[in-house]
Every structure is written in C-alpha cells, then in structure tokens.
Image: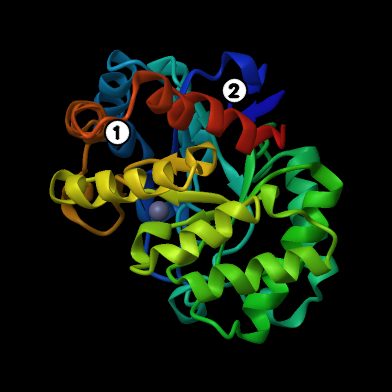
Amino acid sequence: MVQSVTGPIAAGRLGITLMHEHVLVDFIGAREVNPSRYDPDQAFKVALPHLVKVRELGCECVLECTPAYIGRDVRLLKRLADASGLHILTNTGYYGAANDKYLPPHAFTETADQLAARWVREAVHGIDGAAIRPGFMKIGVDEAPLSDVDAKLVRAAATAHRATGLPIASHTTTGAAAMAEIELLDRAGVSAGSFIWVHAHNERETSFHTRAAKGGAWVEFDGVAEDSISRHVELVRHMKTEGLLGRVLLSHDAGWYHVGEPGGGAFRPYTILFTKLIPALAEAGITKDEVRQMLVENPRRALTGA
Ligand SMILES: [Zn+2]
C-alpha cells in the first residue's frame, strides 16, 4: 500500500507515475513562509487544468515534492486530487539545500532522533492537523562534504525510514553528495534501495549514475523539459547500456505556482515527458516495455521498497 493524499492505495494500481513535480512553491524562506501569503482557491484554479491534462495523457499518479517550509499545502493537494482523479502523494522531511534557507530554527537545535520523531508523527497522525499522510520523505542537501545539519537530516531520514518504511527522496545536485548520503544511510542500516537521488541529471559524470544504481539507489532524471530532450535520451541510453534501466526514474520537476508572483507566475505543464521525451526515446531504441519499466514499475518499487 502507498499513502496518497486521499488515502491508501494498492501499489499495483498506481500506473504511470511522475516521481517529481510541484503544485505550489514559496521561496520566501522558513522564517516568513505562511499559508496566508496566497489564495488557495486561485492556486487550485491555476493547477487543476494541468493535472487534468496529464491524467488525459495516461498518467495516474504524481508525487508532489514541495517540502514543509517551502509551501507544502496538503489540503490544496487533496482538493486537486479529488477534482482531477489523479493520485497525489505528499511528503514529510526537511530541505537543507539552498544553504539552509528553508530550514526552521528547530532543525539546527534538535537531534536527528527528534527530527525523525516529527516526521514519523506526520506519517502516523497526518500533516498540519489534517488526516493526510505522506507517501514519501523529501529532504535536500548542499554539496559534499555534507554540512553538519545536512548529515543530520540524512540520519533523521534513516531513522524515520526504519519506523515508517517511507522512501527517502533527496534533492542532491552532485554525485559526490549522493555517495555521501548513501554511505550515511548504509551506516544507519538503511539500504540504498530506499534512497532516491533527486536531480541526478545535474551530475555530468555518468560514472556516478552507474555507481549509485549498481549500489541499488534510485537515479532520478527529473527536469524533463523542451530543451532537455537530447540530454535525457543520452542519460537513459547510458543506463540501458549499463543494464541499469531498472533503477531509473523520470519526471519534469515542473508546475510551480509561485507564491508572490501575480497569478502564480508561469506554471510549467507536466506534459513534455509524454509529448516529446517518450517519442524521442522510441526513436533512440528504447522499447515500450523499457519506458513502462521507468514510468510504472520503477516508481512502484521505489515507493514500496519491493
Ligand atoms: Zn523539485
């Protein structure tokens, strides 16, 4: 079973899953972030047609990767799931990238176990007073070597994983940082199969992708966009050559109703993967079954640890 914002669903029913998208983000920082800074009805109206559209393209499940203190709004996500018919998953965890701008003060003062206890509480009791539980963890780290607080977030995620089974998706822009996280998790008794290396496409050195995937980690090439198609095809072909397509995840990292911009600014659609990338992959010799593996089977396994 996987927790969506509307309740538990059987993992076998997830279908095509986008592993990394956003509905709403607020980059004001942990100090000032607040739901009163936006009108949820307006955000709902902006995001809904995009979610309906991706459902029409055959997608059934979207992981919303906006963490707490960057604008995670689980009630908005539940309304959107109900209205679009999509399964939407939300997350627990803290984002330590961007030089800690999105970490609340208690992230610095509490122990890893105390932070883990907060995340486990959300997984067991729900988020922000709603009966809406996370389907995964989302953390984020800056470059290697990991800072003290970033390493603490990884250890907290390990503890919360052991308690809840939730996979750990981590915003990680370099292979060196991903390796450091995988090693910390290993020391905490958590296998790499519970770790999703978010933004792996930002690492230019493909040997890191090979190493991470051979070690059992999930390598997520998100950021699929109009101008990224050849890059994504190249990355997927590399992984196919290495026999590692069974560890690849794909998504857009799109959406983004920007709090603070008029009308939420330019909302990027969740469609390019279907309209541009899949045809380009086919042309490059990636079979239908292999595409299905990356969009259906790998997400299901990443979310359930199966
Ligand atoms: Zn993202």
Residue 30's x, y, as percent? 50, 70
Query: Element under label 1?
Result: helix
Q: Amino acid at mark 2?
A: Thr
- Mark number for residue 47? 1
Res. 126 image quadrant: top right
Q: Residue at x 83, y 65 (%)?
A: 188
- Mark number for residue 6? 2
Residue 65 shown left or right of residue 105 in the figure: left
In the figure, 229 relative to 202: above or below? above
Determine the CA span between mark 1 and mark 2: 17 Å
Q: Residue at x 49, y 70 (%)?
A: 175
Q: Quadrant of the N terminus?
A: top right
Q: What colour-coding does the image apply?
A: rainbow
Label 1 or label 2, whichever comes before in sequence order: 2
- Mark number for residue 163? none
Q: Residues within 10 Å of mark 2 (few under 14, many from 20)?
A: many
Residue 294's x, y, as percent? 45, 32
Residue 121's x, y, as percent? 80, 48
In the figure, 221 relative to 277: above or below? below
Residue 266 in view, yes or no:
yes
Q: Residue at x 40, y 63 (%)?
A: 206
In the figure, 211 relative to 49: above or below? below
